[in-house]
Amino acid sequence: MAIESEAGAMAPVMAIALVGVLGVGSQWLAWRLRMPAIVLMLLAGIIVGPVAGVFDPQRDIGPLMGPIISIAVAIILFEGGLTLNLHSLQGAAVGVKRLVFVGAPLGWLTSALTLHYAAGLSWESAAVFGGIMIVTGPTVIAPLLRTARLSKRPAALLHWEAIINDPVGALAAVLAFEVVLVLHTATTVNAALIDLVTGVGVATVLGIAAGFGLARAFKRAWVPEYMKVPVLFALLVAVFAVSDWVLHESGLLAVTIMGIVIANANLPSYEEMRRFKEHATVLLVSGVFILLAAQMDFAALARLDWHAAVFVVLVVLVARPLTVMVSLLGSGIAWREQVLVALTGPRGVVLVAVAGLFGERLLGLGFDDAALIGPLAFVLVAFTVIVHGFTLAPFARWLGLTGADKPGVILIGGSEWTTAFAEALKKADVPVLMADPNFGHLRAARRAGIETFSGDILSEAAEQRLELVSYATLVAATDNDAYNTLVATDLAPEFGRDNVFQVTREKSDRARHQLPSTLGGRVFGPEETHAGLNRMIRDGWTFRVTRLTDEFTFEDWRAKRPRAHLVGRISPAGEIRLLRKDEDVKPAKDVRIIALRPPETEKSGNQPPSDT
């Protein structure tokens, strides 16, 4: 099959494949380099697009470009709505309400003033574009929060604001445009109001009806398990299309409401649906950002002057902070959290897509300055994506609003051996949390000054009370093998399967008791059962941490401690990585290793420099 469908053009299938490879490849590379994924996606799109000229979305994908972005954004917003469980709003409810009911109109006003006085736009163009600027970009916030590992409340404020205000911003632009139509065309006030009210009403009714209807159908088993995701997708696209047909951009409101209704319907299959949608959203966000960057027009950007720079700086340093600080005044939210939210307002693809659409419509009405709306939107998105991508995590750390600088370990189950392990981790300055449904099992841990949680780690209470973002590794270590398997399987997608461990199950060496690889976690270090590990502690085995140096290498340690079971390694930066049995330790200076050592003294001519 030829790559080129015509001179200089790429075949649509090849173009879509390129978008997928660049998007996912950028995310993977960002993970490896510990960089903001959004920045790399933006850079990749610019390189293959306007810089190299290899890919032009309008040329290579053609008229499908608009519908692809519209449906992708709808799915992204729906997935965002699926994450808005009202239980997770605990502690941030007041702030979210303020940011929506006070922040949205105030943000519209401050953005319009900035556009008129700093960017030089007419009041008509400023009012329409200002409405769109309410949007803070769920396509951007989600990857940023994943990288920055913020504390629970500021993360919830940013996340909820981005999802809810996204359709609100689009509808604000529709409202402003309807006003412009009334003032500058033969459209009457009554006709404009009827259009707007009908569109918002239809979107709200459709979203609620679709959400409740789907939840009822799933609960009553009217849809078989294997059909749930296809039915969900089909209904989602149908709701978006019908609502958008009634009033342009109202489809975003409909799918967001539909997602929120389903998220709070207590569906048994909710987690499976949400995780599938998360995977789809990662792909869609990647693709949308590549398309956004690749269609950047350098010629259009060249029309901008110093007013654009002033506009961007005022939006980031004045309009956004003023809006947030006034909205959250008297809300009881800590000033550090208010400052973080105020100075974090990245814009995403929804802003560019909707701004381009209304820019063209305003041009059709004779507003020549509307030609600047598209370029201004792109500059604002590019600037905020790059700035927040590199500064959010360090700024949040400086304010003390991130998880622990050293990602810690969660031990599920209070026992002699888990308490001994937790004490060794604590002495090594590794954050550690012990959780157990039985309060009495945690008595020894509390005496040792170890942080504990008395309750089920899978409960909503744990999700609301614990800053799980502070922990990167989990060990399911209760005396109940079935519960350990359940915990490891359920939390593996959140922590990453390589970071979830469980103690060896009883009789796991027998074929009839073996489980498939899709269930449970990795086997914890010594490959002993819960009872076996407790027995070792009673027999005098201890968890010890040893620092490796050029003078005392891992080979020296192994020669000195041949019977010791290696459990993990701690990097010079303090990051812990648990190891499987016989897994090698990469030789590096100042690496510390954790091992379960036998009680007897073992002879060796070379002594360790530090052994705690």
Image (tube, grey):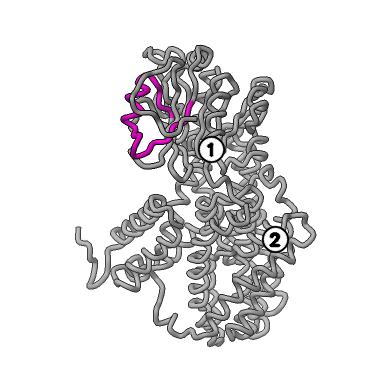
Task: Name the residue type under label 1.
Answer: Val
Residue 426 belongs to the span the image colors magenta: no
Which residue occupies 55% across, 49% down?
149
Element at label 2 = helix
**Circles 2 and 1: CB distance less than 8 Å?**
no
Relative to 190, residue 570 above or below? above
Left or right: residue 586 versus residue 503 is: left
Say which of 519 and 582 sits in front: 582
Q: Position of residue 198 (x, y in %)?
A: 67, 64
Relative to 361, residue 472 above or below? above
Element at label 1 = loop
Task: Name the residue type under label 2.
Answer: Val
Residue 557 belongs to the span the image colors magenta: yes
- Tag 2 residue: 100
Residue sitting at the far right: 330
Which residue occupies 64% across, 58% down?
161
Q: Position of residue 611 (x, y in %)?
A: 46, 30
Instruction: Decide which of tag 2 and tag 1 comes sooner along the chain.
Output: 2
Q: Position of residue 111 (x, y in %)?
A: 64, 75
Say which of 48 and 60 sits in front: 48
Left or right: residue 1 versus residue 431 is: left
Residue 5 visible in the snapshot = yes
Q: Position of residue 67 (x, y in %)?
A: 45, 63
Which residue occupies 51% across, 19% down?
481
Q: Which image quadrant is residue 549 in?
A: top left
Say which of 424 and 293 sits in front: 424
Closer to viewer: mark 2 or mark 1: 1
Q: Identify the mark at residue 430; answer none if there is no mark.
A: 1
Image quarter in which the N terminus is found? bottom left
The residue stretch that appears in magenta: 544-567
